[in-house]
Amino acid sequence: MKTLIPLIVMVSALALSIPTVAETPQEKGFRIAAKSDRMDRGFGSSIAQLEMTLKNAAGQTTTRTLEIKTQEKPNEDVGDKSVTLFFTPPDVEGTALLSHAKILDSDDQWLYLPELARVKRISSSNKSGPFVGSEFAFEDLTAAELGKYSYEWLEETTLDGMAVDKIKQTPRYKRSGYTYLIAYIDQDISQLRKIEFYNRGATHFKTLTQSEFKNYGGTIYRPMMQEMNNHLTGKSTTLRAKSYKFGIDLDDNEFKPSALSQL
Amino acid sequence: MAQITLSVENLGKTLAEFSVKRAWLTIFMCIALVIAGGYGGKNLGFSGDYQIFFGDENPELQIFLDFEATYGKADNISFVVIPKEGDIYQPRVIEAIHDITTKAWRLPFVSRVDSLTNFQHTYAEGDDLIVEDLIFEKSEIAQPGQMERLQRIAENEPLLHEFITASNGTATIINAVLQVDRKIAEDVLGAAQAARDIQAEILEQYPSIDIKLTGASMLSSAFSEVAMQDSATLIPAMYLLITVVMLLVLRSLWATVAGLLIVILSTIFGMGFGGWLSIELTPISVGASTIILTIAIADAVHIIAAMRQKMQRGLEKLPAIVEATATNTFPVTLTSITTAIGFLSLNFSDSPPFHHLGNMAAAGIFMAWILSITFLPAVLTLLPVKYEVLPKDKQNGSVMKSLGAAILRRRYAAFILTAATCAVAISLIPRLEFNDVWSKYFDENIKIRQAIDATRPHFGTDNIEFVIDSSAPQNVLEPVFLQDVKAFSEWLRMQPEVAHVYSVSDIMKRLNKNLNEDKPDFYDIPDNRKLASQYLLVYELSLPYGLDLNDRIDIDRQRTRVTATIRDTSTVEARTLIKNATDWMEKNSQFGATVSPTGNTTLFNYIADRNVQAMFEGGLVLIVAIFIIMTVFFRSAGIGLLSIILNAIPVFVAFGIWAVVSGTVGFSIAAVGAVAIGLVIDYTVHLVSKFMSARRHYGKNNQESILYAFDTAGTAIVATTAILTAGFALLATSAFKPNTDMGLLTAIAIMLAMVINFLIMPGLLSFNSKEKENRL
């Protein structure tokens, strides 16, 4: 049986490589990205508890804890809905951000401020802006939406000993702060291992590294550790997942502005 | 004294005889040595970092680097747009601003671009908070009422008015923040060049506007620009000058060629040595080439002038070369040591470019010394240098000898008068004031100076950063603290030299208003800390790409930064403002907040003090060193003391004169003392050594010995003074003001030193030798 494994691998590799013959780099890039994106299709909804540590160039750090609830939209042309709830620092406890992601347009966002006891809609086109002072943009944090980019497969390479596909992703959203991203998707479980971000001057200015992937049943994986390093400013942000929950039945009503104050 | 002089003279004679006999071998060895040193020149490049002026230990620099690590780098390039006619609120100008903004985003290392068009305008619509670029699409510019809208918003927004847009719309700024490694010159220069390319493109497209480039990165690039300009203009001028002077003094084309060779080879070695030390050239250190040249020529002139005198008095060429070299080996060696020590003492300076200047100059001086006593006799042997023998009656009684005799006759009067004059001049020194206007470091033909001059009528041109500390994490959001920040910002705005204040208190006030349906009553600091924190969260979520709150508040929310843009001020005015500001906070803070100032141009406010302090120590060490050297070489503590007095006095007198002429000194002046003392000690060395050798060797009495010293060293002293003064005066034509001051003041000191040495020496030497005669 053991001797058969290499054979199976070879055959399947051969089988997988057949379509590439006729494929353009764009199609191949899209196919690999789509596979990665669709791996966790059907999770329905998820709750992630995260600890975000910000570090500046002087080495000072600060930590924030938050929870992100995401309701997956089956339609790939419609963005997911999410609620971000802040726990610490204590001054912002109970503050909640509701976002209806749009693929090619500004997201709809509402923020509940407990001290003001009001829900405020924030109309902003700054999707690429830093998320609460971190090196992550809000668009980096939320689940990758296939339609946000156009794709081009560049090459097959290795990353930390893994075979990965290197794909160039160009944002289709006009106001994006990025000219393109270089994504590294492993060939084993099709997860995003690393993304290099290129700014408007086409300079590689930050890098996201995702590690400690954990399986949540089926083909659903999540990184326990995400680290964003800004090479220009010397600042970095780590995002450590404390827990992920999947398949919880989240009511549509929880993703309405009026629900924010009840959280 | 006699032994040392004799042994050095014997060594000189041996060397000279060898050099004359084996001329080609000597030349070959010297050139090999020069090539070995000069090859280091391949490592030389111009620095692209204005911070090179600050030593690693400089406390202000440390504070500033920490500030940058906390709030982000302060390097920037500002495009100042000035419409040729009318104000900026015309569609064509706004289009240009929009284009520059877009293009500036593509500058290398850019992390943020701020302009009128991409300003994040926030306002409320009921419970909606709208955050948008003032102009996003270019097509919005043509909308009816758009110009009026822009003007209204700009004039009422504290973060725009007089910061991005000048009052009355006379000009506007597009500011690009760069995260560039200042240590990599080509990156800084590349960014500056990219900005110039954008400037050229836009000017071509929009002839109705003018664009000037300022900012820290342009300043950095200006330093290398001015260094390059200096080396392109000063050095050729210098060569022309010394050629003329040598022709006049030496009266021989071939002797001049020999002198020029010494100069060129010494310069190559000195600069190449800098290359081996991985020195980055600055407008200051580029001056080393001028200085080496000046000193090398002085060495050569002493020897060639002596040879000429001997040939004119009937000696054959080769013996004349050997004897001229031998008798000058001692003074040339000693003056090389003292001058080199003077330059090496620049290592005490707080500003590394002065270390570079000192070390390269010292290396060049060392090489000039070696070459003068080996290469020069060899080359003179090979070159067809000719001097006619003068008739007997013209051989004695040089002009210098007559001068010496005249002074000797009235030596006491000369001594007292000179001493009195010096005392008066020195008493004026306290009138000197340390003051620099750093933007005026640059000559008017340098672009950064033109840009600052053009910006000045519209905007402040300097930043002072005030870091306000709330003493514990999270405290920044305490309402009482925020009230302090607000009051402090308002106080700053009332100061006449302050053009703009960028403060988190304005952001807070606006947020409070925006989140309360834009009700004007809420345009104030929120009265509750949690609310303030939550507002900041809103602010953070609304920020565009490239901006974050840490630009204003540090990461653990203990400190916040208030930026005051001030109109072009002198360092004295700036320091007064800083002091008043910190005092104000101490007196008025309700929270107990403290203020510490920093900022890139603020660094320059303290550089003169630092350098003067450091060079004061350096000067003391130098004086002690010179005292020891002179005492040892001349075997007389009296001579050591005499040297110090004779040479410190002219430098002090020069400062006294400067106090009347200019009244202010900048940071480069600190270097003058050490350099000048190291240089002018040469006069004393030459006069005293000739005086001593007349007494010891030829058994002459005091008066005869003084006359002998004037006769043999006088002409060379006048010639070297002419060369040194001219050299430093030429440095004064530098496009870099600190060089101008340093050059001018050193030139004054050198001239004074010659005059004072001539006037006082006969009197002093009479005292000195009288004592000795009594003892003997």
Image (tube, helix red, strand yellow):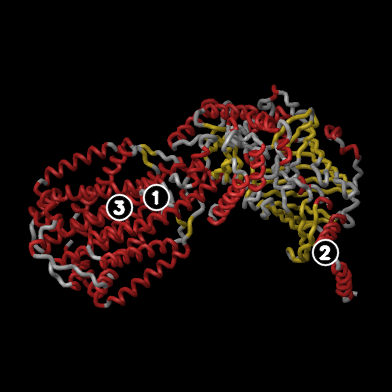
Q: Same chain for the residues at labels 3 and 1, yes or no?
A: yes
Q: Nearer the viewer, residue B172 or A40?
A: B172
Question: In the rendered structure, are the residues bearing label 3 and label 1 in contact, judged by CB atoms less than 8 Å apart?
Answer: no
Disc 1 to disc 2, how far (Cα)?
A: 62 Å
Picture layout, residue B447 above or below residue B164: below
Distance of mark 2 from mark 3, alpha carbons?
73 Å
Q: Which residue is mark 3?
A: B726
What percent of the width, then of the height, locates residue B357? 39, 55
Pointer 1 and pointer 2 on the same chain: no
Query: What amino acid type is highlighted by mark number 2?
Result: Thr
Q: Secondary structure at mark 2?
A: loop
- Closer to us: B225 or B24: B225
Q: Is residue B469 visible?
A: no
The crowding category of the residue bearing disc 1, from other C-alpha atoms within 10 Å (few below 14, some 14 to 19, many at least 20), is many
Residue on which the image places disc 1: B734
User: What number is the disc on residue A24?
Assistant: 2
Figure quadrant of residue B489: top right
| Residue kind at label 1, given as amino acid type | Ser
Which amino acid, by three-letter code, is at mark 3? Ala
Residue found at x 23% / y 62%: B250
Return the x and y of residue B529 as percentages of the image width and height: 69, 30
Q: Residues within 10 Å of mark 2 (few under 14, many from 20)?
A: few
